[in-house]
Image: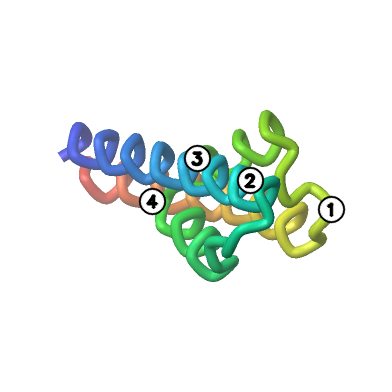
């Protein structure tokens, strides 16, 4: 069960990172963007670390207070949920 959680989190973070990176490319090109709801959704679904990493490395959404505050809070929530799940499994 622990392996399933790890694989899920890995995939969620890869997707969140990829979406943030792709959204940055779309922004630079002036094209239609990925909805913020989608970016936050993947962060909330376990991909907050990937989203935060993309924010820092790609310098994307770093001037938006909702992302600067929201993504780190979701990371804390993600960590709590993982801890809770791992505690229940034992």
In three-dimensional space, the C-alpha distance between marks 2 and 1, rounded to whole angstroms, equals: 13 Å
Q: Which labelled disc corresponds to residue 24?
A: 2
Looking at the image, residue 51 sits to the left or right of residue 55; the answer is left
Badge 1 is on which residue?
63
Of the 4 image quadrants, the one containing the C terminus is: top left
Looking at the image, residue 18 sits to the left or right of residue 55; the answer is left
- Looking at the rendered image, the disc whose residue lies closer to the viewer, 2 or 1, is 2
- Looking at the rendered image, the disc whose residue lies closer to the viewer, 4 or 3, is 3
Badge 4 is on which residue?
84
Question: Measured from the top left, where is residue 59 in percent x and y?
Answer: 74, 37
Question: Measured from the top left, where is residue 25 in percent x and y?
Answer: 60, 43
Q: Is residue 33 above or below residue 23?
A: below
Q: Earlier in the sequence, mark 3 or mark 1?
A: 3
Residue at left offset 67%, top offset 41%:
55
In three-dimensional space, the C-alpha distance between marks 2 and 3, rounded to whole angstroms, equals: 11 Å
Total numbered circles: 4
As helix, strand or loop, the secondary structure at mark 2 comes to helix
Q: Earlier in the sequence, mark 4 or mark 1?
A: 1
| Mark 1 surroundings within 10 Å by alpha-carbon count, few (fewer than 14), some (14 through 19), many (20 or more) | few
| Mark 3 surroundings within 10 Å by alpha-carbon count, few (fewer than 14), some (14 through 19), many (20 or more) | many
């Amino acid at each position: 069960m622990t392996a399933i959680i790890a694989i899920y989190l890995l995939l969620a973070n890869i997707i969140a990172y990829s979406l943030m990176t792709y959204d940055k490319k779309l922004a630079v090109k002036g094209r239609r963007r990925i909805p913020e709801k989608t970016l936050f959704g993947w962060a909330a679904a376990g991909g907050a670390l990937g989203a935060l990493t993309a924010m820092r490395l790609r310098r994307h959404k770093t001037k938006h207070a909702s992302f600067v505050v929201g993504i780190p809070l979701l990371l804390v929530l993600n960590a709590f949920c993982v801890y809770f799940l791992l505690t229940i499994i034992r």
